[in-house]
Amino acid sequence: MMAAADTIFALASGAGRAAVAVMRLSGPATGPILEGIAGGLPPERRASLRRLRDPASGETLDRALVLWFPRPGSYTGEDSAELHLHGGPAVIAAVAGALACLGARPAEPGEFTRRAFLNGRLDLTAAEGIADLIAAETETQRRQALRQADGALARLHDEWAGRLSRLLAHQEAAIEFAEEGLPTDLGDRARAGAAALRAEIAAHLADAGKGERLREGLLVAILGAPNAGKSSLLNALAGREAAIVSAREGTTRDVVEVRLVLAGVPVTLADTAGLREAADEIEQEGIRRARRRAEEADLVLAVFAADGPPDAGTLDWVARGAVAVANKVDLAPAPPSIGGSQPLPVSALTGAGLDDLRARLAEQAERLVGGGDAALLTRPRHRAALTETIAWLEEAERAALPELVSEALHAALRALGRLTGRVGVEDLLDIVFRDFCIGK
Ligand code: GDP
């Protein structure tokens, strides 16, 4: 356990005027600082009303609720405190000034949680879960973040690491016994165990990025020929005038995006320029961007106008799995089949079929991110650690000499340990804590 020398403080609540602002304090001087500003230490872990005074002039700065959390059972594992102030900028500034005057310094982004990690209060995946929980915008995101903050990924890691340690112990025993001339099948068992563990981790990696998708949100691109009604459809789905709708062809020159929540999943809908041979350069650029956005999209809506023939460019996307939508069914009936798939009949103008379209999108969103209660991987960093673990396990299965098997298993364990930060993490800390904001 590392003890930080500095005592840090930061506003834990949002900036701006509010009824209450929470100032957080952590580090070895927390006790003396509370004595200096609040006239003594209040009872542990209980809210006490105190007059906060300027340590130099004795002037009252605010009346506040003071909470004192002595180590080691605090969030950071250090002596820490919370001051629940009246949430005005002048109050916050005055109290911050007094804390600085008593020797505390403003915290860096993520520093409270970083200290919690360094003091063994949580592992890296739990710290990330807390960052995600603070960033969560939808119910499904909140659930995933909370699962991770509660240690779902760490438990999975611990189970794998436990098995890997046992394999390693068997392998090392096999080496020992061989030196004593005793025949054993321990080495073979270690190898078989490595293969089984590798298959299990690989299965977990093959989750189609559900956790990352939920964390980042889905991208749905709306494609179609000019005037098929893409902008109108986007506006109808978004319920506001987000894109410019025009009866002249080729008016959507760039990509217009709106954010919605479908089945608890954040979705970005991107309306794109019409797919056709562009007349001018600006429009050509719009079409290039549209294609690029569609390539990146998790889901593509291919929009056709029911009152005209389907265009080849958009048909290609149906062949590639896009959801076919026949718009303008107020003008003409939807064809029974477009590119071999039955289109969803809608009218952006009258609103017909939009509920079905929303339901279809929600269903797809669910399919793309739904993982039930599984401990999903939520960051590329998790994938990198597990991919490397798998590579070392393969190495262990292939290695000819027992010592090399043992070495590869050691390396696998180190790679796996990077997931939770229990092994070799120094270089990872910045990546993880970069996601935090001050005071968290
Ligand atoms: P985009 O170029 O694909 O984005 O198409 P727009 O959304 O700009 O629509 C082109 C034209 O079709 C506009 O005049 C719209 O008002 C009209 N339009 C769009 N959707 C419908 C619809 O469902 N029914 C009818 N009758 N007109 C529509």
Image (spheres, rainbow, N blue to C red):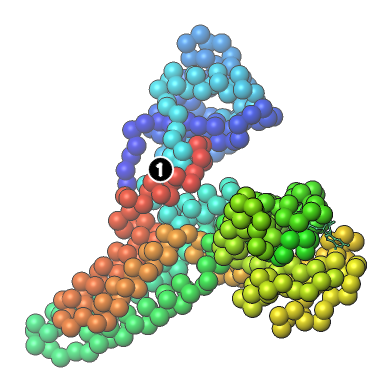
Give the class, few, some or many, for how many residues have Cα within 10 Å of label 1's Cα (few <14, many ≥20).
many
Residue 301 in the image: above or below residue 187: above
Is the CB–ligand 1 distance for label 1 below 8 Å? no
Residue in the image at 42% along x and 59% along y: 381
Residue in the image at 55% along x and 52% along y: 132
| Residue 362 as seen in the image, left or right of residue 375 | right
Residue in the image at 52% along x and 14% along y: 54
Is residue 70 among what the camera can see? no
Residue farthest toward the left in the current orientation of the protein: 180
Residue farthest toward the top in the current orientation of the protein: 57
Residue 322 in the image: above or below residue 246: below
Q: Position of residue 337 (x, y in %)?
A: 77, 82
Residue in the image at 22% along x and 89% along y: 185
Residue 237 lies in what quarter of the image? bottom right
Q: Position of residue 293 (x, y in %)?
A: 59, 59
Mark 1 residue type: Arg
Mark 1: secondary structure: helix
Tally of numbered discs: 1
Q: Position of residue 390 (x, y in %)?
A: 35, 73
Q: Position of residue 407 (x, y in %)?
A: 20, 71
Residue 426 in the image: above or below residue 65: below
The residue identified by callout 1 is: 115
| Residue 406 as seen in the image, left or right of residue 66 | left
